[in-house]
Amino acid sequence: MEKKTFVKKDLIVKLQAQYPKVLNTDIEKMVDIIFKYLSNQLALGHNVEIRGFGMLKVKTTKPRIARNPKTGGKVEVPSKRKISWKSSKLLNIAINQEDKKIEQEQI
């Protein structure tokens, strides 16, 4: 089975097919607004939870001393924020079904 990456443009195309009376530019703007809002919330350090899908958490790493593999010298790595993903229980059940044939729901 060939794996396909579902990208933002695919989401926009699906929404355009589902809602033909809504202008395409409006759908694109709505999707962009949603992603921009989620990105801004994460940048502010807030967690983002989408029920039935998953949760994005902002975690801060501790500063540490690492080794440069090329020179072998020590390098100070400052603390930074990273995003951690945890899928919901419902999503885990859906992707781990035995038959792997999940009906595609209309958005």
Image (cartoon, helix red, strand yellow):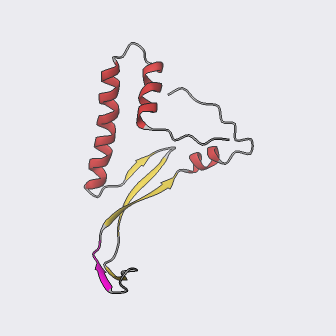
Write the residue at 26% across / 48% down.
Answer: 40
Quarter holding residue 2: top right
Screen quadrant of the N terminus: top right
Q: Nearer the viewer, residue 49 or 70?
A: 70
Kindly give the residue lying farthest to the bottom in the view shown. 73
Q: Position of residue 26 (x, y in %)?
A: 30, 23
Tell me what residue is drawn at x 41 percent, y 54 percent. Answer: 56
Horizontal side of 102 relative to 60 (left or right) equals right
Instruction: Please state the horizontal and vertical placement of residue 51, each as a whole percent of the image.
Output: 47, 44
Q: Residue furthest right?
A: 99
- Give the image quarter of residue 16: top left
Magenta: main secondary structure equals: strand
Q: Residue furthest front?
A: 70
The reply to whether the magenta stretch includes residue 46 is no
Start-end of magenta stretch: 74-79
Position of residue 20 relative to residue 64, above or below, is: above
In magenta stretch: residue 78 = yes
Of residues 92 and 1, the one drawn nearer to the viewer in this rendering: 1
How many numbered discs? 0
Reply above or below: 66 against 48. Answer: below
Residue 14: horizontal and vertical position, in percent? 47, 26
Image location of residue 49, percent across then percent down: 41, 49
Picture layout, residue 72 above or below residue 3: below
The residue sitting at 30% across, 82% down in the picture is 75
> Compared to 41, does 77 lie above or below?
below
Q: Residue at x 52, y 43 (%)?
A: 52
